[in-house]
Amino acid sequence: MKKVTLYIFLAAFFFGTMEISLKLAGNELEQFQLTFLRFMVGGLLLLPFAVSEIKRRQLRMDIKDYLYLLLLGIVCIPMSMLLFQLGVMRSNAATAALIMCVSPLFTMFFAHFIIHEKMKRKNVIALLISVTGILFMVNPFNMQEGNTVQGILMVLAGAALFGLYSVLGKISIKKI
């Protein structure tokens, strides 16, 4: 098996088990601690690769670029994942996973208004079908045991922030 294929399977496995792991770890650690630790460890692991890539490409970044990336790194991702973690603790892991999967819909929505990407008819139809499907799955009028409105709204807010991050990240990639 090629290394790339192995890495894809590992990433899919870890991402697919994230909600259950967060639910279990959330019983032992405070949600803020858990989110902080996740991103501190991830950031420290990725930092050498980022520094190496910046040097290799000889990227020139000014203070505004660093501040913009800092804003993305502090506001969008950690806040998104913190809301997700808080939502996971107040809902079923499966429900949280399902709702978090709508972040591409938020990306499409924000891209239309922020970077003026064209929203085609098929995008609007996909958006409506997805929202309808989520409503049927979550059923806010008769929620499954373990789900709360607060938890669902937190996960939705996390998905929205992640969608916003995707669009704002695209802007920074163009700049850099």
Image (cartoon, helix red, strand yellow):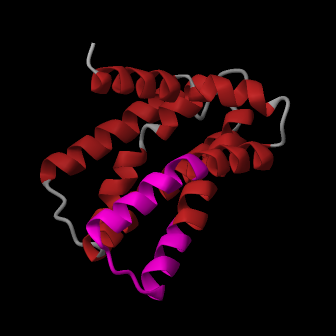
What is the x, y in percent for residue 40?
66, 51
| Residue 50: quadrant of the picture | bottom left
Residue at 54%, 64% (x, y): give it. Answer: 73
Query: Which quadrant does the C terminus fall into?
Result: bottom left
Residue at 34%, 80% (x, y): give it. Answer: 60
Residue 2 is inside the magenta segment: no
Magenta range: 44-72
Front residue of 88 and 62: 62
What is the x, y in percent for residue 61?
38, 81
Residue 71 is inside the magenta segment: yes
Residue at 67%, 35% (x, y): give it. Answer: 88
On screen, residue 1 above or below 91 = above
Query: Which quadrant does the N terminus fall into?
Result: top left
On screen, residue 3 above or below 116 = above
Q: Residue furthest bottom?
A: 63
What is the x, y in percent for residue 167?
35, 63
On screen, residue 53 above or below 104 = below
